Image (tube, rainbow, N blue to C red):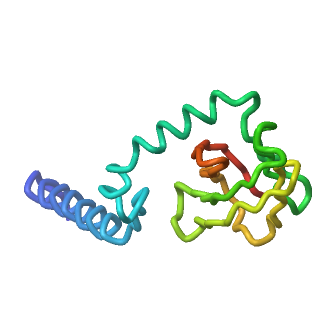
């Protein structure tokens, strides 16, 4: 059997239609996570984040997170030592919201907190640290890779 121009045109159209159907099915099965479920509410309070980040940048050192074996060591700036510090750490994973984890900030006298990293699913996180000391709020973000 020989293919004339009508057969070739029909096969080309069917291949194109099949590709479009495949792309539609794949896009409907893709899971998308939003940065926040309450995006607009968070947006209204974003000035507090800007102010807290400004205050945190004015401190002598930055907040650091180091990974050793199965531990994450959070070190707040030196000015937070011997202070009553309260707050939280959101480990935000942009890939998958199921990996996100919120941990209460409970630092010792040296402004250090140790967290067991085995409770995390391996991946790249952004640690969003919010804390208050002496009635002043602070905010910083630190990238963290957990393996």
Whether residue 111 is situated above or below residue 37 in the rendered picture: above
Q: Is residue 74 left or right of residue 125?
A: right
Question: In this view of the protein, which residue sits in the foreground, 144 or 88?
Answer: 88
Q: Residue furthest right?
A: 69
Q: Residue furthest front?
A: 134
Q: State which quadrant residue 90 falls in.
A: bottom right
Residue nearer the viewer, 73 or 84 = 84
Q: How many marks?
A: 0
Residue in the image at 35% along x and 66% along y? 26
Front residue (pair 126, 109): 109
| Image spot of residue 126 (x, y percent) | 61, 50
Viewer-side residue, 34 vs 116 = 116
Which residue is rendered at x = 83% and y = 47% of the image? 66
Which quadrant is home to the N terminus?
A: bottom left
Q: Residue at x 40, y 45 (%)?
A: 46
Residue 31 occupies which quadrant of the picture?
A: bottom left
Q: Is residue 71 left or right of residue 2?
A: right
Quadrant of the drawing holding the C terminus: bottom right
Q: What is the x, y in percent for residue 134?
A: 66, 47
Find residue 118 and report its horizontal and vertical position in percent.
81, 69
In the image, what residue occupies the spot 72% across and 34% down?
62
- Residue 114's spot in the image, x, y percent? 84, 60
Q: Horizontal placement of 147 versus 93: left or right?
A: right
């Amino acid at each position: 059997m020989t293919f004339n121009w009508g057969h070739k045109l029909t096969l080309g159209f069917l291949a194109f239609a099949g590709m479009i159907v495949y792309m539609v099915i794949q896009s409907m099965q893709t899971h998308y996570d939003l940065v926040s479920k309450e995006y607009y509410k968070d947006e209204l309070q974003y000035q507090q984040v800007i102010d807290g980040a400004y205050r945190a940048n004015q401190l002598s050192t930055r907040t650091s997170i180091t990974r050793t074996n199965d531990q994450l060591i959070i070190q707040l700036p030196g000015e937070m030592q011997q202070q009553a510090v309260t707050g939280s750490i959101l480990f935000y994973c942009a890939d998958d919201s199921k990996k996100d984890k919120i941990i209460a900030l409970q630092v010792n006298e040296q402004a250090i907190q140790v967290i067991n990293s085995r409770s995390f699913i391996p991946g790249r996180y952004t640690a969003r640290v919010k804390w208050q000391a002496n009635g002043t709020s602070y905010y910083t973000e630190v990238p963290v890779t957990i393996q």
